Amino acid sequence: MPAHRRLVDLLREGLGLTGTKEGCSVGVCGACAVLVDGDMVSACLMPAIFVDGTSVETIEGLSPPEGPLTPLQECFIRHGGFQCGICTPGQIMAATALLRDNPHPTELEVKRWMMGNLCRCTGYYKIVESILAAASGEGAPS
């Protein structure tokens, strides 16, 4: 693997994990957010060689292929937290990192955490609503 290959290219082209999207290519839109050893990173900025020996989580790894979805994913569906779907994987990965770090965030904490994830379709209200719903326990299996 070339030393300059980015993590987003390894995921999408090398491993066929196309859920991670590339939006801006400069680390400001959040579409390529993944978790490396539990920390959110921009896969478009991360050299792939830097993840050798780490745990990388993508949208594909949050739930098994045949389900069930995570409570957060369920809440994004129930509350309309996505529209076109381009930013959705990055939004969900960022929100996953937030809820692992802070399982019961306030609305302001959600907005601050998510400010690095851009969306041109939803207006953000439904994204915040989806995250707060998951934090409240909605979407969990009964």
Image (cartoon, rainbow, N blue to C red):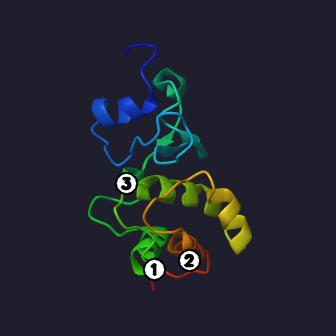
Q: Which residue is drawn at the image coordinates 44% and 26% (left, top)? A: 6
- Residue 129: image tag: 2
Circle nearer the viewer, 1 or 3:
3
Q: Is the residue under label 1 in contact with that under label 2 (CB below 8 Å)?
A: yes
Crowdedness near tag 3: few (<14), some (14–19) or many (≥20) residues, C-alpha within 10 Å? some
Image quarter in which the C terminus is found = bottom left
Q: What residue type is labelled 2?
A: Glu
Label 2 environment density (alpha carbons within 10 Å; few <14, some 14–19, many ≥20): some
Q: Where is residue 90 in the image (x, y as percent from the top left)?
A: 47, 52
Residue 114 image-quadrant placement: bottom right
| Distance of label 2 from label 3 (alpha carbons) | 19 Å
Q: What element carries label 3?
A: loop
Residue 12 position within the rendered picture, expressed as x and y whole percent measured from the top left: 32, 37
Q: Mark 3 points at which residue?
A: 86
Q: x, y percentage for residue 76?
A: 44, 72
Distance between the Cα atoms at labels 1 and 3? 17 Å
Q: What residue type is labelled 1?
A: His
Location of residue 85 in the rendering, given as x and y in whole percent from the top left corner: 36, 60
Inter-mark Cα distance, 2 to 1: 7 Å
